[in-house]
Every structure is written in structure tokens, then in C-alpha cells.
Amino acid sequence: MTGDDRHGDHRHGHGRPGEDRHAAGPGAAEHGTGAGHGSASGHRSVPEHRARLSALLAHLAAREPVTVSLEEAQGAALAEDLVAPGSLPRFDNSQMDGFAVSSADFDRPPSTPSGASTPSAASTAFTVAAAIAAGDTPEALAPGHAAPIMTGAMLPEGADAVVPVEQAHPRAYPGPGERVELPAAEPGTFVRRAGSDVEGGAVVLRAGTVLGPRQLGLAAGLGIGRVRVRPRLSVAVVSTGAELAEPGDGLAPGQIHDANTALLAAALREAGITARTVAVRTDDPAVLLGELGSLTAGSGRPDAVITTGGVSQGAFEATKLALGGRDVEFAHLAMQPGGPQGLGTFNGTPLIAFPGNPVSCWISWEILLRPVLSALLGAPAPRRRLRVPLAEPLSSPQGRLQVRRARLLPDGRAELVGGPGSHLLGALAASDALVLVPEDVTHLPAGADVEVWLT
Ligand SMILES: Nc1nc2c(c(=O)[nH]1)N[C@H]1C(S)=C(S)[C@@H](COP(=O)(O)OP(=O)(O)OC[C@H]3O[C@@H](n4cnc5c(N)ncnc54)[C@H](O)[C@@H]3O)O[C@H]1N2
Ligand code: MOO
């Protein structure tokens, strides 16, 4: 992780109260419509918080699409339908290394030229024509002839079937004019018909499709080198906390290594988002304000800022202290982990405040922000959601959506990994799924069906 660590650069001139020009951002006052949408626990519900995130980021859906190379397009969502300029396969071609023949020739009585061995009743003797390699433009096949043909090579006019070389006698490619015996083949045998995969002119990918390896392979196979996509988001991750040290550096007593920067930046990049990172290794709100001020100034500012840490009830909550009273609101969600959250704007840039515990960060991204981005922008693609039986019983706090880390077992059951604690990085790394336990559920027996998101 090459974090842009500007700790120690105390530029207090930026982002002080009164310097924060954020007229466009949806401030706390505009979020006052949530009454009645809270959870039974009195905390804000997850759908309500998602709706606020969606309103905060809605303008990002209106950005002009861009035309980019396939390499640059990975992870982006198509801005328009992708239409096949031609067919796949482009032309009738061979699926096997063997001999191109006309199936009609098998109907003729076997020919036994003088000096040739008598073919078996099941095969027919052919005169060998010129061999056809992939990339060749073959000559038409004359009746009674079989052309050695390689996989992918264009079928010659007059041929409608291919016999693999393994079935030929001799099991080889005799020279032109020599003889080869082949067993009968139906029309179309081992022939890959033009357009049998994709028809020219067809819509092959719908607007909004996220471009991964398979989609990019299709575009390339169709000869499409550049695609029109929704522009990539750029997000800055600002981790905060006086206890944080750079991974790789030594620790003073009481310090811990910063996991959130690497975790969130990787999550963003995996989602096709450009991520930059800033570590604010102090609980001084003025330093955080300075960093946020310089981050959100100028044309290079990100589309959004995510902060981690400093949003709970402690005495040194830098994020809350720095941003409280500005256009950022703080709330406690009916979710665990990931309860304390903030959102709003700083200098007009959307700002989302995640809690500091690493698992809380991950859950906040997976359960709150990622689904909002999927719905608004198409990318990243939504996580796959399944209902599967639990491998073991669990209990969950009343009035909270509890999100547990789990592994999907080969038999299709979800096995919990670690407990519910939001500091359990080891268990998080061993998981490949999230189990969502609804707010009103406090106990589930083994075998109960649960909602699982594959991560
Ligand atoms: N009295 C209360 N205390 C707490 C409450 C509460 O409601 N009342 N909520 C708890 C919950 S739930 C969470 S989640 C955390 C949220 O705390 P903050 O967002 O203020 O985060 P911090 O206090 O800065 O850190 C919490 C925890 O995470 C560690 N941390 C922080 N940043 C990183 C990082 N970049 N890499 C690794 N670990 C990090 C930090 O050292 C703390 O252990 O508050 C509870 N408390
Ligand atoms: O809401 Mo916190 O994320 O449980 O530890």
C-alpha cells in the first residue's frame, strides 16, 4: 500500500469553520425526512441510511460516459448496449484437426482404385486435397476429395463436415493426390457454423453490464477495441486515529497497524473505483480538517471521501469533532457491526464516515455503500445473494441487522467464521460470505435458511 501519508503536515489554513464552501451538498437539514423510517430500536434502519447515501451520491450517475480501451474498461459499466458488428464465429470453420469432406460423398459406393487397399465397409476412400491451415482462404472442395483441415480453419466451399484425423486411415495427413479412408460423417459434424454463437447485429451486452474478463473477451472477439462506459469513480480513503502506524513500521506501546486503509482501498479498487489514501495519524480535529480541505480543493478532488474512525462516543473522536456542526450528520444504525455512521459533504464533496473497527469498515462498504453504487451507477455489480441453511445455531441482538462473516461450505451450508466482534480481522480474512440476520431475529437454529451475500 502506497498511502499518501501526509501526517505531520499541519496545514490548518484549509477547511476551518467558515472556509468550508459546500453549498451544493445535501446537509443534515435535508436529511430530515427519515422520521418513521427508523428501526424499532430507535436507531436508523439500513434501508433509510442507504436512501440517504443514494441521495448524497445521485449526481454521480449523471456524469458523461467516456470511450476507453478494453484494458481501461475492466470493472466499468457499459454506458450503452454493445451491438455485435459481425457474427461469431465469423465463418464456418473446423472444430477439429482432421479432414473437411462433403457428407454427400459418403452416400456414394466406396471407390477402390487399383493398387489401393480395400476400404472397410464403414469407410469411404477420398482423394486428399491441399491442406487448409487456420488463416487460409481455402479453394472449393471437389467431389470425392477430403482436405486436411486444422482447428479454426475456414471450411472450403463444398464441404459440410469434418472427420477428426484420429478416425482416418492412415491416421495422418497424406499429401495432395494421395488416398485417405474416412468413416461416414453427418452434415455439420465438427463444424462451427458462422453466427452459431453470436449473430451480427445482435445486442450482446446490455447498457449497465459490468465489464469483467468474460465480457471483455467477447468484445475483443467481436473486434471491438474501445467501449463507451460510465466513468470510474475516484474515492479518497482517509483513515484517522492517533494509534495508527503504517504497516511495515514498528509499533510504539499502544499503537496498532492501520488495516483500514489497505482494506478499503482494495475493496474500492476491486469494485472498479480509483482509490487514493491519506492516513491522519492523530486525533487532532484541526489536522483532519486541513487534510480534508486540501483533498477537496481543486480540480483533482475525488468524487467522494470516506473517513474511517472517530465517529463514536469517545472523548477524542476526531472525525465527529472536526465535522460536527458542518454539513455532515452522524447517526447510529440498527446494524452490527457498522453501527456508528456519518454522511454529508465537505467543501461540496460527498463525505461518508465509517466507524474505525476494520470489520465495521468492511461491513459498512459491503452492506451500505457498495449496494448504493451498484444501484446508482451499475458498477460494481451487486453481490450474489443466496438463501442457504446455517451450519450452526446463532444468536443476534434484538433490533439490529446483524452481519456475520461466514464461509460457504461445499454442501451449500453457511459456516460462521469467528464471533460477531468488529475487530476480528483474522476471521474476516477467512470468510467468503456475509450472513444477514434480520433486526427482529434473535436466535436461529442450525439448518435455518439465512440470507447470504457472496463476497
Ligand atoms: N460508549 C460507546 N463506545 C462505543 C460505541 C458506543 O456506541 N458507545 N460504539 C462502538 C462501536 S459499535 C464501534 S464500531 C466503534 C466505532 O468507533 P469509532 O468509529 O469512533 O472508531 P475508533 O474509536 O477510532 O476506533 C475503533 C476501533 O477500531 C480501531 N481502528 C481504528 N482505525 C483503525 C485502522 N485504520 N486500522 C485498524 N484498526 C483501527 C481502533 O483502534 C479501535 O480499536 O466504537 C465503539 N465504542
Ligand atoms: O457498530 Mo460496531 O461496528 O459493532 O463495532
Image (cartoon, rainbow, N blue to C red):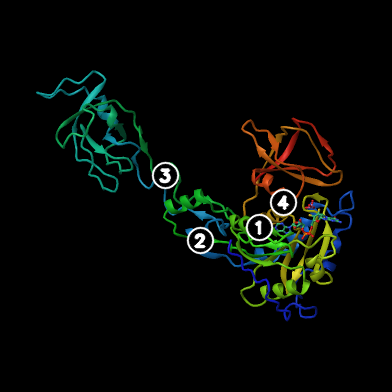
**Mark 4 element type:** helix
Type of residue at label 1?
Leu
Mark identifier at residue 195: 3
Q: Is mark 4 within 8 Å of ligand 2?
A: yes
In this view, the residue in front, 248 or 344, is 248
Cβ–Cβ below 8 Å for labels 3 and 2? no
Disc 1 vs disc 2: which is toward the camera? 1
**Mark 3 element type:** loop
Indicate which disc, 1 or 3, sits on the residue closer to the N terminus. 3
Q: How many marks?
A: 4
Indicate which disc, 1 or 2, sits on the residue closer to the N terminus. 2
Q: Residue furthest top?
A: 121
Type of residue at label 3?
Gly
Residue designated by label 1: 264
Mark identifier at residue 359: 4
Type of residue at label 2?
Glu
Disc 1 vs disc 3: which is toward the camera? 1
Indicate which disc, 4 or 3, sits on the residue closer to the N terminus. 3
Mark 2 and mark 4: Cα distance apart in space: 30 Å
- Height in image: 266 above or below 121? below
**x, y percent for residue 314:** 84, 61
Ligand number 1: quarter of image? bottom right
Mark identifier at residue 72: 2
Q: Is mark 2 within 8 Å of ligand 1?
A: no
